[in-house]
Image (cartoon, rainbow, N blue to C red):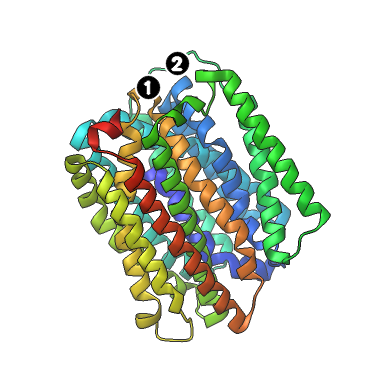
Amino acid sequence: MLASSLAFIDGSVTNLALPAIGKELKAGATDLPWTINAYLLPLSALLLLGGAMGDHYGRRRMLIIGVLIFAAGSVGCALAADLTMLFALRAVQGIGAALLLPNSLGILGSSFEGEERGRAVGIWAAAGAIASAIGPPLGGWLVDTVGWRAIFYLNLPLAGASILITWRYVDESAGSKDPLDWQGAILATAALGALTWTLTRWSSQHLVSIQTWLGLATGVVFSVLFVVTERHRGDRAMMPLSLFSSRPFVGLSLLTFLLYGALGGLLMLLPYVLIVGGDYSPTKAGLALLPFSIVVGAASPLAGRLTGRIGPRWPLTLGPIVTGLGFALLMRADPHASYWTSILPGMVVIALGMSGAVAPLTTAVLSSVDEHHTGTASGFNSATARTGGLIATALSGAVIAETGLDLIDAFQIAAVIAAILATLAGVAAYLTLGNNSQTRR
């Protein structure tokens, strides 16, 4: 839980620091999304490999290595002298997160079964929400009083504690002898990088150039090569295509991509709009996000236990639809109006919906494979979630590029799109998931 919280805190705090980073390092609408995407890109592309490495070399070992890399990247971000250095060290953080996230969940999934697993995942989700709750207000205060660089030092105490506990109390998992899919990892990184660069450039500049078409074509070519490579490797691939013969697995993947794409885009844009469009201080903007984390932290253990009893279909159907209703409420968001009537209702409803989806989704994914592949399964699901957030962040340049009233209008349009995506996620769950035993098979 401590290791996973590193990624949760870093994501929420960095969103709050975007205006300050842009001001000090002179980042424009095209550059700012890369503060997030330089981290999400290696995280999305390497999560599958990180899970496979845990299955291969041992999850305990890879968790500790991932935390160490993440901590080193955090120190580097705090000392970055320019945008290029910041982006490079954010990528180092992403590599560390790609190792620690799937292996923390792999350790959790292999330690519990049945209803206990649902309860454990619910507690894990609640811990992540609590970490996310502490992060924004504390990070906002640090940005206001010390500067944005201080937010990256927040990761060091958590990193040290997680390494100490893992070293002393977690048993090493049995390793496998299957060769790792380095070729697939390189192709996935190249494909996501090209597509992300293309979407970021297009959304921030509102034009389609020769470079944009070349970037899109390059991303498509690398994507095709990745699929061909994975098909050739069969069950030895980091993303075995045989997984997609399972209807529940396809449904869970589609739900994850749509729901976390919607959530990632809005949670990045909301603090930016509050600070730039509504003259909120970073501390005040951090406190504005607090209700989301409190509600998720309180309700996730209940949702985890409920899923262990009734299965994931109904929680994963109703949770995203309720989340979509919350996004729809943000269509009337105005940073100049009262926070209590303009922002808070949407945030609370989104949090209630996500509470019904986070723990059931993780439980359903971990229950769909044997314990020797929980790292790979959790890695794939996390990669799908981060890829959704990666694409949403790349497209957010269209909102960041606006100013004044146009910024608020663009945010409200983004809220409509997020509402549609979240609702479609719930529909996908209803159509593809059966009862608990069918989902497990």
Residue 124 appears in which quarter of the rendering?
top left
Between 145 and 228, which is closer to the camera in this rendering? 228
Q: What kind of element bears circle 2? A: loop
Q: What kind of element bears circle 1? A: helix
- Say which residue label 2 marks: 176
Residue occupying the point 50% across, 70% down: 271
Q: CA distance from mark 2 to mark 1?
A: 9 Å
Q: Residue furthest top?
A: 177
In the rendering, at what x and y percent does residue 400 appear? 62, 69
Identify the mark nearer the N-term, 2 or 1: 2
Residue occupying the point 50% across, 79% down: 280
Residue 285 visible in the displayed image: yes
Q: Residue furthest right?
A: 210
In the picture, measured across the screen, residue 162 lies left or right of residue 191, that is left
Callouts 2 and 1 close, C-beta under 8 Å: yes
In the rendering, at what x and y percent does residue 435 appear? 24, 38
User: Which dot marks residue 270?
Assistant: none
Between 93 and 416, which is closer to the camera in this rendering? 416
Q: Residue furthest bottom?
A: 337
Badge 2 density bin: few <14, some 14–19, many ≥20, Cα 10 Å: some
In the rendering, at what x and y percent does residue 369 appear? 35, 27
- Say which residue label 1 marks: 372
Badge 1 density bin: few <14, some 14–19, many ≥20, Cα 10 Å: some
Which quadrant is home to the C terminus? top left
Residue occupying the point 49% across, 54% down: 261
Residue type pointed to by label 2? Ser
In the rendering, at what x and y percent does residue 75 appear? 58, 49
Q: Residue furthest left?
A: 309
Between 269 and 63, which is closer to the camera in this rendering? 269
Residue 331 appears in which quarter of the rendering?
bottom left
Which quadrant is home to the N terminus? top left
Residue type pointed to by label 1? His
